[in-house]
């Protein structure tokens, strides 16, 4: 029997878009000055920030793909329900 997915609370880090020594990082309800962190912690923070940016970019790409998918579905609906109209639309697009 498959295990149920459990919701786990992950630590959240909030930072400004560009990290410098004076950047303030909020992590687990505490605030830290970026310049006061150890080098490994700074590297992890940069990696986390990069990961969050990639997630945001992927969400944006998924939104664009969804728009394209809906346009294709609309074209398919016309192609199925009104093949003559679809053919006419295709011919106009080629001109």
Image: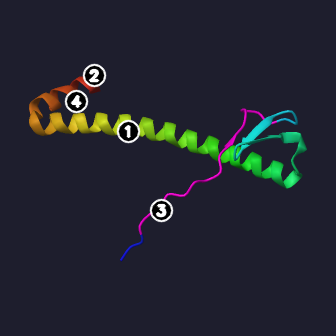
Magenta-tinted stretch: 4-19
In this figure, which residue is indicated by the disc labeled 1? Answer: 66
Rendered-image quadrant of the N terminus: bottom left
Left or right of residue 80: residue 19:
right
Per the model, the C-alpha gap separating discs 4 and 1 is 22 Å
Q: Residue at x 56, y 39 (%)?
A: 57
In this figure, which residue is indicated by the disc labeled 3? Answer: 6
Q: Earlier in the sequence, mark 2 or mark 1?
A: 1
What SS does tag 2 mark? loop
Left or right of residue 12: residue 92:
left
What SS does tag 3 mark? loop
Q: Residue at x 12, y 40 (%)?
A: 80
Where is residue 91? Give x, y as percent: 21, 27
In this figure, which residue is indicated by the disc labeled 4? Answer: 90
Extreme-bottom residue of the structure: 1
What SS does tag 4 mark? helix
Task: Write down the quadrant of residue 34 in the picture.
Answer: top right
What SS does tag 1 mark? helix
Per the model, the C-alpha gap separating discs 2 and 4 is 9 Å
Per the model, the C-alpha gap separating discs 1 and 3 is 28 Å
Q: Earlier in the sequence, mark 4 or mark 1?
A: 1
Where is residue 59? Give x, y as percent: 50, 41
Q: Earlier in the sequence, mark 2 or mark 3?
A: 3
Q: Earlier in the sequence, mark 3 or mark 4?
A: 3
In this figure, which residue is indicated by the disc labeled 2? Answer: 95
């Amino acid at each position: 029997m498959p295990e149920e997915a459990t919701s786990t609370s992950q630590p959240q880090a909030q930072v400004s878009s560009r990290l410098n020594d004076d950047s303030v990082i909020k992590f687990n309800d505490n605030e830290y000055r970026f310049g006061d962190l150890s080098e490994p912690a700074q590297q992890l923070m940069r990696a986390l920030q990069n990961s969050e940016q990639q997630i945001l970019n992927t969400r944006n790409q998924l939104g664009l793909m969804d728009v394209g998918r809906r346009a294709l579905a609309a074209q398919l609906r016309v192609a199925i329900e009104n093949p003559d109209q679809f053919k006419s639309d295709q011919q106009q697009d080629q001109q």
